Amino acid sequence: MGQSTKKKRRRQNVYEGGQSNARKEMIMKKLRALKERRDNTRHSKQQKNAMDSFFGYINNTGRFKNVVDDEGKRHYEHVTAEMFAEFTTTLTTNKNGEDIMLKKRTYASYKSALYKLMKENGVAPSETLKHGIREHLNLIGRENVSDANKGIRSLVLGSPAWELDFFKTLCKKLLESGGKKDIWALCVLLFAFNLIARINRIFKLRLNHIGWESDSMYVIYADSKSDKQGNDRSPKHLYTNLNEPHFNLPFVFALYLLSSDFNGTGSIFSDTEEVPLEEYDDSEEGKDEVPSAATSSLMDYLREALFGNISSVGPDLQSCLSKYFLR
């Protein structure tokens, strides 16, 4: 009987081992497919072309054999900020017969591609490299402003920041209105304010990103532009404000949870009625800077539904409406 039991266990172990190997193969196949899909995105191809140009320049100068050797092998640990700065001077445009630098964000995309490639090859960008490149990009930014002042370049200015007094008055107005969508809008705005985040990012928050620790609520982002793998799990703590209920995020978030229905997906704001949310593609850097459909819906609500009748708001808000909302 003991011998029969051993045979049975042996057969079971062989079966389970085969099942485990099949599962591992299936997982590896999925990972290979995802990597291939990532590498074939427009953004990945742009980054590859950018790095081919950078290392092509390094190789063609013949002065940096410690970075690209005679066999064409790249040694990422020897890349310096001076090399990056020299390379950027080859990327210019001609305006009125004068060569001028491209916009700062164009060169920043080369920086991001370089850091990504270094990390993929097991080399972490040093603080000296990052500091040097950051200083160089800031210099290019100042050069862009100088070109704009000369009239040979146009710079697009961002919208003015909301003044704190106006923001607080707006939050108070939303809480006093008390409608379901008012609480939704207030909750989104307070999350963005407290986390110092773009509204696009707030619409990507899920319930499992939020928790409670000691005397504060916290948020942990799933990923970020500089941390696509989600390795940085440091929490962002959010505290109550007992003196100003309209500025008390945990309180307003509780009101929102009590007044909203969720369909079990874990999304916090994307399932709100009449607030469509665009599908987000992590492969495209800078997507956070383009307003999503949900962000546009929020601003449309504040602009049209809440302030559609300017006579319905108090004098504290009227003075700022033309600056921020009214077209």
Image (cartoon, grey):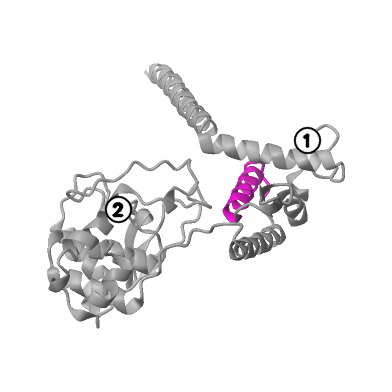
Q: Amino acid at mark 1?
A: Lys
- 286 relative to 105 in the view: left or right: left
- 317 relative to 178 in the view: left or right: right
- Please provide the residue range marked out in magenta: 104-123
The foreground one among 188 and 28 is: 188
Pointer 2 residue = 296
Can you give x and y, in whole percent of width and height, for residue 98 in the image? 71, 53
The foreground one among 97 and 104 is: 97
Q: What label does residue 276 carry, if any? A: none
Q: Is residue 14 above or below residue 267?
A: above
At x 60%, y 54%, the residue is 103
At x 26%, y 49%, the residue is 270
Can you give x and y, in whole percent of width and height, for residue 90 in the image? 74, 47
Q: Residues within 10 Å of mark 2 (few under 14, many from 20)?
A: some
At x 61%, y 45%, the residue is 113
Q: Quadrant of the N terminus?
A: top left
Q: Amino acid at mark 2?
A: Ser
SS for callout 1:
loop
Q: Quadrant of residue 316?
A: bottom left
Q: Residues within 10 Å of mark 1 (few under 14, many from 20)?
A: few
Q: Is residue 117 magenta?
A: yes
Q: Find the distance from the CA under tag 2 to the CA under tag 1.
A: 47 Å
Pointer 1 residue = 73
Q: Quadrant of the C terminus?
A: bottom left
SS for callout 2:
helix
Q: Is residue 74 visible?
A: no
